[in-house]
């Protein structure tokens, strides 16, 4: 076993204990490989980036299931393929569902989609609850969530805004989303 393989096994072991630096190192090391793979498959930068972020999120959630008999990069690519297949199935299902409606259904669908006063109230309450949950996060997590989802900034724009490397932004956003999901689940 060479030095690079030993180092990778050590980093994976530290990541399994929840070490954030190890997660960041793995993201830096394998981001281009997974992103490049998805870019070739999807031919779409936004889809490739979204799938890659989802890949690392899922991999980091399930890192304890990683079997060291396999290559880590191969494991990530397998996760990435599955996420892409799920995305294609979801889109195909939406297209098939949409194509089954007649023109009359389209008219009714458009009319029915306008939110009622009750719907607006529910939306406002849900947004207020979500904002309250976000406020429970540490300030640096709040900032990346707000910039990404409320200001709709790209990872590169957030990195420039916060004067941090883009991979740090990706890791912070992954961690912020996980922490937010945990807060929401406990409610």
Image (spheres, rainbow, N blue to C red):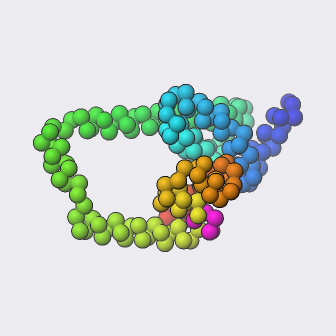
Q: Residue at x 72, y 39 (%)?
A: 29
Q: Position of residue 11 (x, y in %)?
A: 78, 45
Quadrant assignment for the N terminus: top right
Viewer-closest of 45 and 142: 45
**Would residue 71 be counted in the magenta stretch?**
no
Q: Is residue 152 visible?
A: yes
Q: Position of residue 141 (x, y in %)?
A: 61, 63
Q: Magenta: predominant secondary structure element?
A: helix
Span colored in magenta: 138-142
Q: Is residue 169 visible?
A: no
Q: Residue at x 68, y 38 (%)?
A: 30
The reply, left or right, for residue 160 in relation to residue 85 is right
Q: Residue furthest top?
A: 40
Instruction: Locate residue 115: give its quadrant.
Output: bottom left
Q: Residue at x 32, y 68 (%)?
A: 122
Q: Position of residue 87 (x, y in %)?
A: 44, 37
Viewer-closest of 184 and 142: 142
Q: How many marks?
A: 0
Q: Position of residue 137 (x, y in %)?
A: 59, 68
Viewer-closest of 1 and 23: 23
């Amino acid at each position: 076993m060479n030095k690079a393989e030993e180092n990778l096994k050590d980093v994976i072991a530290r990541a399994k204990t929840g070490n954030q630096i190890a997660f960041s190192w793995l993201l830096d090391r394998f981001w281009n490989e997974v992103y490049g793979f998805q870019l070739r498959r999807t031919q779409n930068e936004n889809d490739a980036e979204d799938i890659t972020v989802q890949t690392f999120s899922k991999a980091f959630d399930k890192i304890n299931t990683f079997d060291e008999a396999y290559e880590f990069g191969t494991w990530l690519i397998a996760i990435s393929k599955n996420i892409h297949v799920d995305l294609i199935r979801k889109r195909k299902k939406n297209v098939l569902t949409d194509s089954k409606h007649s023109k009359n259904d389209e008219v009714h669908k458009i009319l029915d989609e306008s939110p009622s006063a009750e719907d607006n109230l529910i939306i406002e309450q849900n947004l207020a609850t979500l904002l309250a949950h976000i406020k429970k996060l540490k300030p640096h997590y709040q900032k990346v969530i707000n910039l990404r989802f409320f200001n709709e900034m790209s990872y590169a724009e957030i990195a420039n805004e916060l004067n941090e490397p883009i991979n740090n932004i990706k890791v912070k956003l992954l961690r912020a989303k996980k922490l937010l999901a945990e807060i929401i689940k406990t409610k």
